[in-house]
Image (cartoon, grey):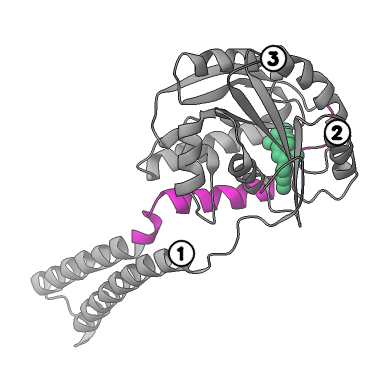
Amino acid sequence: MKERVLSVVVSVYNEEQALPLFYRTTSPILKSLTWDYELIFVNDGSADGSLTILRNLAEQDDRVKVIGFSRNFGHEAAMIAGIDYAKGDAVVCMDADLQHPPECLPAIIQKLESGYGVINMVRTQNKSAGLIKNITSAVFYRVINTLSDVKFEPNASDFFAVSRQAADVLRRNYREKVRFLRGYVQNIGFHKTTIAYEAHDRVAGESKYSIRKLFAFSVNTILCFSSLPLKLGIYAGVFAALLGVVVMIYTLCTRQGAPSGYATIVVLICFMFAILFVIVGIIGEYLAILFSELKDRPVYIVEETKNLEK
Ligand code: UDP
Ligand code: MG
């Protein structure tokens, strides 16, 4: 009897081609571990046969557990749902396309056993991503690391492991609606380490993240992790005020032959706008806080589960 249990969370969206291979590759590795395991598949509203495959797997193997969403809620929601339902002493999140090699699991267990609470898997190479994705990803991390107080590891992935204690923090305290799990994992503290891995090509099917989706996701993430953009109004106000002073001094000193009243108008407009921008900036700050709290919609809706109580 193995003492501890590893919960492996796998998000699944239209992966009917990859799933059987994923299960066949991962199961023997999981069985060979010194920990017992549960394999939690989160079906994120797949439109193909993924759910049928998962139901069959759950029927044959009671270590396979399935959470079925009522519609597509996105990868982030799928991961958090898996973490919510996980019963293990540690949780690993990975993709269903075998881009996150299950061969790394023994190394993860080793790190967990030596007391690490957060293990970030860092890509050494991402051949499949292509030049554009690699460049945009680099730009995104540069921007967010400049604007945000918290620091992000540029090559981190949605492949990570957390101890039960760290998973509890994610379950309880990180219930934000617009989320970036990878960012939370890197910033909840605990005894942290990284393991390098080589990202392989997807075994089957296509990437579910288009450039457009990634862009929207990046903008949301930057806004969630930094309030600096909100303060632009305040900076604009201060700038306009300074400009007003400069124009005032300039017109007073040079006594240039402008039509009478011109200088007064310019100075006044600058000052008025300065005040306006500052006020808009402050209201924006409040509004952003209220808006994110107020909506309180569910992050995901579960329609069915297999081999899971709750
Ligand atoms: N995924 C998901 N919901 C989505 C999009 C993707 O659960 O709306 C899953 C997908 O099935 C895969 C993982 O998230 O297991 C990563 O997606 P993908 O491989 O398409 O992203 P990439 O590796 O290209 O960044
Ligand atoms: Mg992938």
| Three-letter code, disc 1 | Glu
What residue would you read off at disc 2?
A: 57
Indicate if the residue with disc 3 has its beta carbon within 8 Å of ligand 2: no
- Alpha carbons under labels 3 and 2: distance apart: 21 Å
- Vertical placement of 92 versus 76: above or below? above
Residue 183 relative to residue 213: left or right = left
Q: Residue furthest bottom?
A: 260
What residue would you read off at disc 3?
A: 103
Residue at 69 percent of width and 29 percent of height: 38
Nearer-N-terminus badge (3/2): 2
**Which span of residues is magenta-colored?**
203-231
Rendered image quadrant of residue 271: bottom left
- Give the structural element (helix, strand or loop) at label 1: helix
Image quarter where ligand 2 lies? top right
Residue 226 in the image, given as x and y percentages of width and height: 40, 50
| Three-letter code, disc 2 | Leu
Residue 234 relative to residue 1: left or right = left
- Alpha carbons under labels 2 and 1: distance apart: 39 Å
Task: Tell me, for residue 293, which label it has, or none.
Answer: 1
Q: Does the residue at mark 2 contact the one at mark 1 (Cβ under 8 Å)?
A: no
Residue 139 in the image, given as x and y percentages of width and height: 52, 38
Residue 20 relative to residue 73: left or right = right
